[in-house]
Image (cartoon, coloured by chain):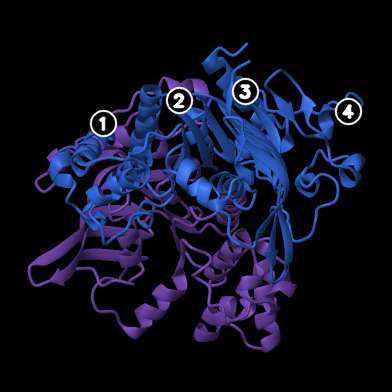
Amino acid sequence: MEKNILTVKNLDITFRTNAGNIHAIRGVDFYLPSGKTVALVGESGSGKSVTMKAVTGLLDSNAIINSGNIFYNGEDLLTLTKKDLRQKINGQQIAMVFQDPMTSLDPTMSIGEQIMEGMFLHKKISRDDARQRAIELLNLVGITDAENRMKNYPHQLSGGMRQRVVIAIALSCEPKILICDEPTTALDVTVQARILNLIKDIQAEMNLSVIYITHDLGVVAKVADFVNVMYAGKVIEVGTVEEIFYDPRHPYTWGLLSAMPDLETDDDRLYSIPGSPPNLLHEPKGDAFAPRNKFAMKIDEREEPPMFKISETHYAATWLLHPDAPKVELPAELKSRLMRSRKAANYD
Amino acid sequence: MIEPLLKVKNLRQHFKISRNFTVKAVNGVSFEIYPGETYGLVGESGSGKTTIGRSIIRLYDPTDGEIFFNRDKISGELSHRTWRRLRKNMQMIFQDPMSSLNPRKKIGDIIGEGLDIHKLYSSQKERNEIIGEILKKVGLSPAHAERYPQQFSGGQRQRVGIARALVMNPRLIIADECISALDVSIQAQVVNLMKDIQAETKCAYLFIAHDLSMVKYISDRIGVLHKGYLVETGTTREIFSNPAHPYTQSLLSAVPQPNPAVEKQRQLISYDAAKANYEKATMRRLSDTHFVMT
């Protein structure tokens, strides 16, 4: 078995708000194998960002961690104090690339200073060495004329350039894990493709393990080795990227896949998941997806499905996989779509 | 031959920032939209697609060029009568459903505002009926008219935005990135709704977006913008199966596909935007509907 660099076990988080307690994370398990890329996929409110905030200790003060462990190299990050987390883990071991490069840089500091800031904080390094390293990093992320760019301020750069700078900052202390929170949603498609390729190249070069948080399945298909699909604070399906895209088992994953047209979609209507995600202010009874699921059975209203094993790497939480469940036909559009993509990929 | 519903001729929209600096957002764009069709406008941020939408509906005064709508000239000074006709027949759906609805007004009044201004009802009862009807059409219930925007989710608010545009029974709806702020599963719901409404009312859409797979899905014809120039226009099939302009090709090569095997072997076609000089370019005709800038 591959070694997991990060393991999240049974994480359970509640937010205390004026309106009541929101049970945002309801028992999340996931693993990040060393050197691989894992994607967390789901709609807004499904808990993907909250899970990652728990890993980096950036949760808001009204969050209560009810239970769970986050192991990084055998150490439980949840038992560390905030100070230890900041000094030893954040930035140095686990670094984060945020969603919006327009707001995640300091407008009053030159980009060179911002890249060096983390190095001064975490490493004993001279100013000259840090400068040298910063220029190397800018070259690595594909910014030409790095020496002069060091003096630039964020507003002098385009969106794609800024995101490159953010990546350079994240890489400045040679982290082992890079967490990318929707790194390209604010960018154009052409720029997006270039940034994703860049992260991939750097990953190979520095032997990084990467976590992507995204709702864009096109991005997932491009970058991920493993996929975790989240819904209402739970991981409801997990598998390798091929298993999720060519052999999805959870009705929610079906819905997500068919809601996004590919360039060959010719149908008159897109398949859409009816309704909207549940409000976690009120604890859902039974399967949280049941009200939107046309395949829902009686048991879905009473009891939450456990994770059913499909293969060593592929698990899904739906009663449809129970041996006693009736066989269901996939929606026709999705079926033809899956056939098409399997064929293109020569997937058994 | 069918008359175009909207005709944009050589539209220029410049913004003067200071004495020495003018942003040339749109530089001589021409295209037509026919009744009942969907015209997709794509391009990267800063390419001028939103500006074009806003110039057409006259939120901006075009610097140069002509716009005809239903044979009325709607660029330059407008008479009171033309204004009213334009406002009734052309409507807009905005990008962000969170900020485009007045939080202090009830949904019914937001939708009814246009009706009030144009006096399109004879009694309060009729007004409520029209509003209830339109709410049902977009998948909400007439009882929702009494609620405020913050009581709705993002997808529902965008439905209200669509209802507000539809209630005037417009001939043309300008949809400016109207799905990009929504979740994937909700996007599909809204796009389906827009298609259903078009089938029923035969209205035309100007669909402005940067998500090419969605544009391909909804549009009959597409225009590709770059740096304020229309570099290519054609039917959806022509643009996607036979892209002629290098910028279009690079754009298409970057569209993410939900298929890992395809994604992992994908080659990007790069396009050096700095070298592009469109000022002296002319449109070359490839077919009756397909034109490319060379």
**Residue A156 position in % (x across, y down):** 21, 55
* Of B290 and A168, the residue lying toward us: A168
Which residue is tagged 1?
B270
**Residue B147 position in % (x across, y down):** 68, 76
Corner quadrant of residue B129: bottom right
Which chain does the numbered disc 2 sit on? B
* Of B239 and B209, the residue lying toward us: B209
- Residue A37 left/right relative to A127: right
Q: Is residue B238 visible?
A: no
Corner quadrant of residue B131: bottom right
Kindly indicate whether the residues beneath marks 2 and 4 are on one polypeptide chain. Answer: no
Which residue is tagged 3?
A246
Residues at discs 3 and 2 in contact (Cβ within 8 Å): no
Residues at discs 2 and 4 in contact (Cβ within 8 Å): no
Say which amino acid is labelled 1.
Ser
Which residue is tagged 2?
B263
Q: Nearer the viewer, mark 2 or mark 4?
A: 2
Which chain does the numbered disc 1 sit on? B
Spot the residue most to the bottom.
B123
Which chain does the numbered disc 4 sit on? A
Q: How far apart in space, not on screen, are marks 2 and 1 (Cα)?
A: 16 Å
Which residue is tagged 4?
A326
